[in-house]
Image (tube, helix red, strand yellow):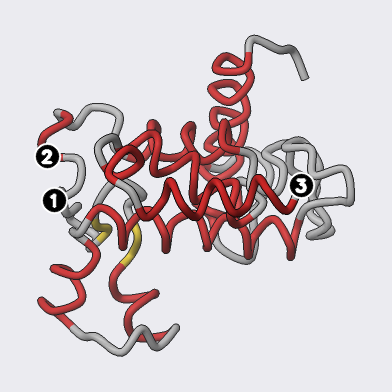
Amino acid sequence: MFAHYILILWLAGGQWISADANREIVAMSIYYGVNPHVALAVARIETGNVPEDRKDSVVSKTGDVGRFQINKKTWCQKHRIGLTGKECEQWLQVRSNNIKLGVSILARLQKKYANTDRSLTSCQCNGHHSGGWISHYNGGVVVQPDTRAERYGVRVGKYARQSRGLQW
């Protein structure tokens, strides 16, 4: 197992990984212990209709930036990245920064909300929603049944299963 981490770190520093966003997402997912299919599904949903050449620079009306649509107000101010305003937005528009932060957020949520089996349909938040732990990426701390966040979690699960060719 240790040899895999060495290989991933070596590839991550190389141009083979950085040449393709999906490879970079997979490498960061493995590094952070997040299912790569989940991370790819989140990135796909967050910037699904945006042309590939704009996925890293896109900024939503609510201030969500890049491939993982990271909210600059939340992650730059509350979580002390050390950047503010336009500087933060530019930092998040660098693909490698956005992917690394996006996957690390997924890892935090997984650690906080996922049951030990890490299945996408489970959640330790004491909520009664069917979106699983991943719905907290979209909904924050509290996810209620029949909300946008719950539907988001279900959709991520669907895309992750499709990419694996499995039924969960």
* 64 up-or-down from 19: above or below: below
What amino acid is labelled 2 in the image?
A: Arg
Which residue is painted at 69% across and 55% down in the image?
Answer: 110
Dividing the picture into quarters, in which one does residue 20 lie?
top left
Identify the element where label 2 is drawn: helix
Mark 3 and mark 2: Cα distance apart in space: 36 Å
Callout 1: few (<14), some (14-19), or many (20+) C-alpha neighbours within 10 Å? some
Which residue is painted at 27% across and 58% down in the image?
Answer: 64
Identify the element where label 3 is drawn: loop
Mark 3 or mark 2: whose residue is earlier in sequence: 3
**Label disc, if present, on residue 54 of the rendered structure:** 2
Tag in front: 1 or 3: 3
Dividing the picture into quarters, in which one does residue 61 lie?
bottom left
Q: Nearer the viewer, residue 44 or 153?
A: 44
Which residue is painted at 44% across and 83% down in the image?
Answer: 79
Q: Nearer the viewer, residue 44 or 141?
A: 44
Residue 34 in the image, given as x and y percentages of width and height: 63, 47
Badge 3 is on which residue?
1
What amino acid is labelled 3 in the image?
A: Met
Quadrant in the picture for the C terminus:
top right
Residue 100 in the image, given as x and y percentages of width and height: 41, 59
Mark 1 and mark 2: Cα distance apart in space: 5 Å
Mark 1 and mark 3: Cα distance apart in space: 35 Å
Disc 1 to disc 2: CB gap under 8 Å: yes
**Label disc, if present, on residue 57 of the rendered structure:** 1
**Label disc, if present, on residue 111 of the rendered structure:** none
